[in-house]
């Protein structure tokens, strides 16, 4: 069966178009760095990539939450550490008080009270950190020393359905209950200051155990924060490992292997040039074509 010149020409043109399209696709993959540049390139792959991106976005949000929580924990622990030191100073004064120097010691206690009050009024991102859920309310009344917050806490989402809760109840941290009465650190310091000014040795000694208990509460709270920080770091590390794995899977589906693509491009260009050469030889007009 004789193949007409038109059929040959059509076949060659179709092959040239196909080769040209493949060349264009490979060039696009190299320039964009992506194997998938449109839905038609790989419909199934597009679905996978979208799923991977959704997962990576969620992981990124959890990692941001963890970073913020770690900063908050560090900040809170630093403040509690400073308060802890000041409570220890007050306890030392009460334990070794010389009532003859009562006025001078009372001034020291008053200064300690002011410093602790300032520290308890610390804010994080514009909110009081020791007021529970009442983040717009200063935790302690500066005059009476009473706790003005509630027993709320600060929760952080670190995974799907997984929350880490940070204590924000300053009253719990800085209050000692005696005979059914709640005495904040400020109530105790006020009593100690008054006892020192009046030379009341019994009143002074009565505050030692209260301050020791508050000191113990603070150390326990700081220990919880240290454990919380470790947990946050462990969770952060696990998310980092998973994120790397998911990113690798996404890259395998979507990203171009530039070295492989460059080799493919060279082969395709060579094939295209050979096809052009063959076409020029096969389709050369002869005298018979005009008869």
Image (tube, rainbow, N blue to C red):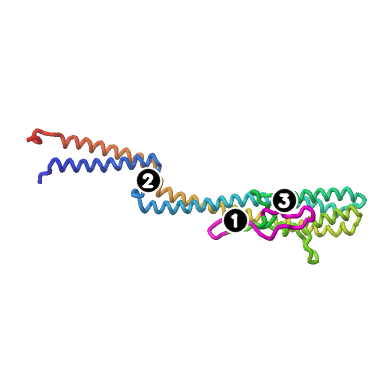
Q: From which residue to which does the magenta span run?
A: 135-162
Q: Residue at x 41, y 53 (%)?
A: 48
Q: Do the residues labelled 2 and 1 touch (CB within 8 Å)?
A: no
Residue 100, image x and y in percent? 93, 50
Decide whether residue 143 is among the magenta residues.
yes
Residue 13's image quarter? top left
The residue that label 1 is drawn on is: 156
Q: Is the magenta stretch mostly helix, strand or loop?
A: loop
Mark carried by residue 24: none
From this view, report whether residue 224 is shown above or below residue 35: below
Q: Can residue 167 be seen in this view?
A: no
The 10 Å Cα crowd at callout 1, few under 14, some 14 to 19, many 20 or more, is some
Frontmost of labels 1 and 3 is 3
Label 3 secondary element = loop
Mark 1 and mark 3 lie on one chain; the one further toward the N terminus is 3
Residue 218, image x and y in percent? 73, 56
Mark 3 and mark 2 lie on one chain; the one further toward the N terminus is 2
Q: Which residue is drawn at 13% across and 40% down?
A: 5
Q: Quarter of the image containing the C terminus?
A: top left
Frontmost of labels 3 and 2 is 3
Mark 2 and mark 1 lie on one chain; the one further toward the N terminus is 2
Q: Do the residues labelled 1 and 3 touch (CB within 8 Å)?
A: no
Label 1 secondary element = strand
Residue 55, image x and y in percent? 48, 54
Gap between marks 2 and 1, in whole Å? 37 Å
Residue 142, image x and y in percent? 77, 52
The residue that label 3 is drawn on is: 121
Q: Locate residue 11 relative to residue 196 in the image: left or right.
A: left
The 10 Å Cα crowd at callout 3, few under 14, some 14 to 19, many 20 or more, is some
Q: Locate residue 242 relative to residue 282 in the image: left or right.
A: right
The residue that label 2 is drawn on is: 37
């Amino acid at each position: 069966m004789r193949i007409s010149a038109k059929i040959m020409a059509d076949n060659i043109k179709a092959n040239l178009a196909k080769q040209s399209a493949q060349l264009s696709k490979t060039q696009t993959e190299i320039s964009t760095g992506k194997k998938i540049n449109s839905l038609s390139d790989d419909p199934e792959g597009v679905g996978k990539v979208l799923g991977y991106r959704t997962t990576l976005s969620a992981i990124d949000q959890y990692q941001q939450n963890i970073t913020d929580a770690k900063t908050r924990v560090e900040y809170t622990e630093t403040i509690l550490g400073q308060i802890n030191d000041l409570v220890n100073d007050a306890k030392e004064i009460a334990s070794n008080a010389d009532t003859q120097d009562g006025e001078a010691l009372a001034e020291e206690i008053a200064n300690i009270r002011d410093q602790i009050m300032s520290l308890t009024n610390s804010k994080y991102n514009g909110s009081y950190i020791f007021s529970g859920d009442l983040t717009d309310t200063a935790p302690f009344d500066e005059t009476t020393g009473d706790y003005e917050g509630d027993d709320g806490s600060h929760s952080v989402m670190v995974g799907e359905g997984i929350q880490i809760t940070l204590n924000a109840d300053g009253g719990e941290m800085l209050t000692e209950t005696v005979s059914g009465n709640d005495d904040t650190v400020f109530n105790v310091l006020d009593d100690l200051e008054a006892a020192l000014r009046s030379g009341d040795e019994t009143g002074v000694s009565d505050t030692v155990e209260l301050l020791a208990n508050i000191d113990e509460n603070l150390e326990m709270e700081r220990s919880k924060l240290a454990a919380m920080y470790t947990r946050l770091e462990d969770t952060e590390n696990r998310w980092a490992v998973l994120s790397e794995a998911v990113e690798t899977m996404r890259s395998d589906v979507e990203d171009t292997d530039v070295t492989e693509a460059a080799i493919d491009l060279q082969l395709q260009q060579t094939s295209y040039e050979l096809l052009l050469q063959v076409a020029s030889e096969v389709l050369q007009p002869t005298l018979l074509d005009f008869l």
